[in-house]
Image (cartoon, grey):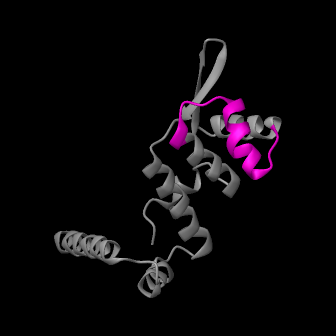
């Protein structure tokens, strides 16, 4: 089960388009609305006003910050990428998998996309979990 479910359920949610936008901004920050609209917006079929609305919504949710520089607002991410990823994964596990990690672990074990480095990383994680479990007993 996911720890601290009550805290996680109070987290603002991110839709797929918002997550794509947030990732783009994180890779290119600081950016203006125009810069995002001309690149990601054009690629996704969003007009400038849609990009602005999405960016402002992300700012209100606490995922973006903005600063006025030479008359233009420049946006940057307000949270570390790992924190955002954890929030998205927690929500997916809670809402789509009923709080159980087993289906996700089964998926990973059967995935063809894992390379040797991924398997080593997962093995280290399991070792850490087992060591932690030993300490808790």
Magenta segment's dominant SS is helix
Residue 122, percent from left and from top = 32, 74
- Residue at x 73% of width, y 41% of height: 54
Task: Give the image quarter of residue 53.
Answer: top right
Q: At 50% across and 83% down in the image, what residue appears?
A: 103
Horizontal and vertical percent position of residue 4? 45, 59
Indicate the quadrant containing the N terminus: top left, top right, bottom left or bottom right: bottom left
Q: Which residues are magenta?
A: 26-47
Q: Is residue 110 magenta?
A: no
Residue 122 falls left or right of residue 131: right
Is the C terminus in the top left, top right, bottom left or bottom right quadrant? bottom left
Q: Is residue 55 above or below residue 74?
A: below
Of all residues, the one furthest to the top in this rendering is: 70
Q: Nearer the viewer, residue 37 or 88?
A: 37
Residue at 46% over, 48% down: 81
In the rendering, at what x and y percent does residue 18 appear?
67, 49
Residue 50 image-quadrant placement:
top right
Residue 52 is at least partly visible in this image: yes
Above or below — where is 18 with respect to 125? above
Q: Is residue 54 above or below residue 121?
A: above
Q: Along the line of sight, which residue is nearer the eye, 111 or 99?
A: 111
Q: Is residue 30 magenta?
A: yes
Q: Is 64 left or right of 121, judged from the image as shown? A: right
Can residue 13 be seen here? no
Residue that appears at 57% across and 67% down:
92
Residue 108 is left or right of residue 64, and the answer is left
């Amino acid at each position: 089960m996911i720890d601290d479910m009550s805290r996680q359920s109070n987290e603002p949610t991110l839709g797929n388009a918002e997550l794509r936008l947030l990732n783009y901004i994180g890779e290119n920050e600081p950016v203006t609305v125009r810069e995002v609209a001309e690149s990601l917006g054009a690629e996704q079929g969003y007009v400038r006003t849609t990009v602005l609305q999405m960016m402002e919504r992300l700012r209100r949710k606490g995922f973006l910050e903005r600063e006025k520089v030479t008359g233009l607002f420049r946006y940057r991410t307000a949270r570390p990428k790992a924190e955002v990823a954890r929030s998205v994964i927690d929500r997916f596990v809670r809402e789509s998998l009923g709080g159980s990690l087993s289906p996700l672990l089964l998926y990973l074990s059967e995935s063809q996309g894992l390379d040797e480095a991924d398997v080593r990383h997962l093995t280290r994680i399991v070792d850490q979990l087992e060591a932690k479990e030993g300490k808790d007993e």
